[in-house]
Amino acid sequence: MHCKMHELIKENSTMANKHELNFESFLHNLSAEELTRATVKIGEGSISDLGALSIKTGKFTGRSPKDRFIVDSPKADKVDWNNINQKFPEDRYHALKSKLVAYLNSKQCYVQDSIAGADKRYSINVKVVAEKPWSAQFAYNMFLRPTKEELSNFKADWHVLCAPEFKANPEVDGTRSENFAIINFDDQVILIGGTGYTGEIKKGIFSVLNYLLPTNYDVLPMHCSANIGAQADTAIFFGLSGTGKTTLSNDPERELIGDDEHALTDDNVFNFEGGCYAKCIDLNEKSEPQIYNAIKEGAILENILYKEGSKMPDFEDSTITENTRVSYPIYHIDNYKEDSKGSIPKNIFFLTCDAFGVLPPVSKLDQHQAAYHFISGYTSKVAGTEEGITEPKSTFSACFGAPFMPLHPTVYADMLMEKMEEHNTNIWLVNTGWIGGSYGVGERISLKFTRAIIDAVLNNKLEDVAFMPTPIFDLKIPMSCPGVPSTLLNPRNSWQDKEQYDETALNLADMFVEHFKQFEDKADNKLLKAAPKNLTSVVI
């Protein structure tokens, strides 16, 4: 089937080397083994006792959202400009790009040809030009790997130019600081400089698809993981980094479609990527065996120290960052879905890490509540996922992925609700954050209990269970759930100080209402009625 996406963008891809890069002198499409050896040879990595390459990404161990820009060009006319989608002038982009290209041409660079999007109708070809071999290996791990036939006539639709040691001059180049990530929809290029954090590569392409798919087709991009059961029942998990997307979608009883980035069409769900990028802090083989066992030759460990006197990764050590990571090709997971596609989802989970300890571990949302919580995208940024985040910080991120959404949040929300109403999909709000008190007082909900909740939903164990509403948020919580103490299901019951819970819940309700004001002009009355009610008294 001919790719629809290529038909739309090939007009800008006809020149073999319009970017003036010295491709002839670069190393192309090396294997993961060759890239690992190259990294060790230049002294920027070592082989851990688990077989994976271990690297340090330097100053930046997470994304730097304030240094991410979109070029203000004709084909970016639908971008929702705001403090996330920041404008960058075309003239300064081209000047900075020329400097970056000259820099890369002076280096021994590594080129990796990749595909983003498992459904060929909507995929794009991506050529990553990397200063570092480990950046190229990350691209090999994380994107879909072309076949030999596809490589023989590979033509890039988009280029990613990645140079961690290239530093911008803010006064001259127009950046905020020496590091930057800049997307140009007309040039079909992403510039990355001054940062070695590999996540900038994958999130740059994710942002591109988040603009192209809804703009050109009725296809919804989603910041979610996905898996599928034996009965072809797909489940998807929305959530920001650290909320459990990767962990909860890795289920030995279900095939993994992907752990982070997908699209929903009229007839399927498909993965954008060909790999996984899992958090490693406190990782252990017993609680997360699939991720642990995926850490082997070909995988890349990021910013993880070794146990003293060995090369065994110390997953409990957060000296460098809480955002320790591992990237690996999806085939490192035993039960991955080979075609990276699934059916229309039967269940959708909104994962939120509530640092206030107010929201219940699980609640079922009606259509309007689902739209409200999707647009709100409440969670807490977990330590290390962004520069300067050292402890959980409550935030609202529209569509559970605002940093990667170039269009207005209501575009994505309307598409999701239309598709879910059509297919009668169940939507659940799952709190993977705190219980029994706010951060610093309570404790994070046990992964064992969250897994039990997910299993109960996927195995239809909550269909005959009675639900009761909570005050303020009017969330429908189950009276019982297999494998979960009933005292935890109602969050108020888990707090020793009930009055403190009520006060905290009212404060969180205020935060929801205040944040949603920016969307009220585009929300109907039914959607507005799904907002939490700031009651003067609470009775349970």
Image: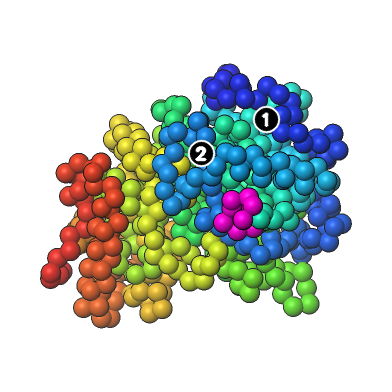
Which x, y percent locates residue 502? 22, 72
Which quadrant holds the C terminus?
Answer: bottom left
Above or below, comparing residue 126 to residue 81 in the picture: above
**Marks 1 and 2, how far apart in space?**
22 Å
Q: Nearer the viewer, residue 115 or 175?
A: 175
Q: Is residue 481 left or right of residue 161?
A: left
Tell me if mark 2 has few (under 14), some (14-19) or many (20+) residues whose alpha carbon lies within 10 angstroms of its own.
many
Q: Looking at the image, which residue is at 39% across and 61% down?
A: 395
Tell me: residue 407, above or below residue 332: above
What's the residue at 67%, 54% (across, down)? 168
Residue interval drawn in magenta: 170-180
In the shown orientation, is residue 243 left or right of residue 48? left
Residue 515 appears at what percent x and percent y?
A: 30, 56
Q: Is residue 141 visible?
A: no
Q: Residue at 24% of width from left, 63% of height from top?
A: 510
Q: Secondary structure at mark 1?
A: loop
* Residue identifier under label 1: 156
> Which quadrant is the N terminus positioned in?
top right
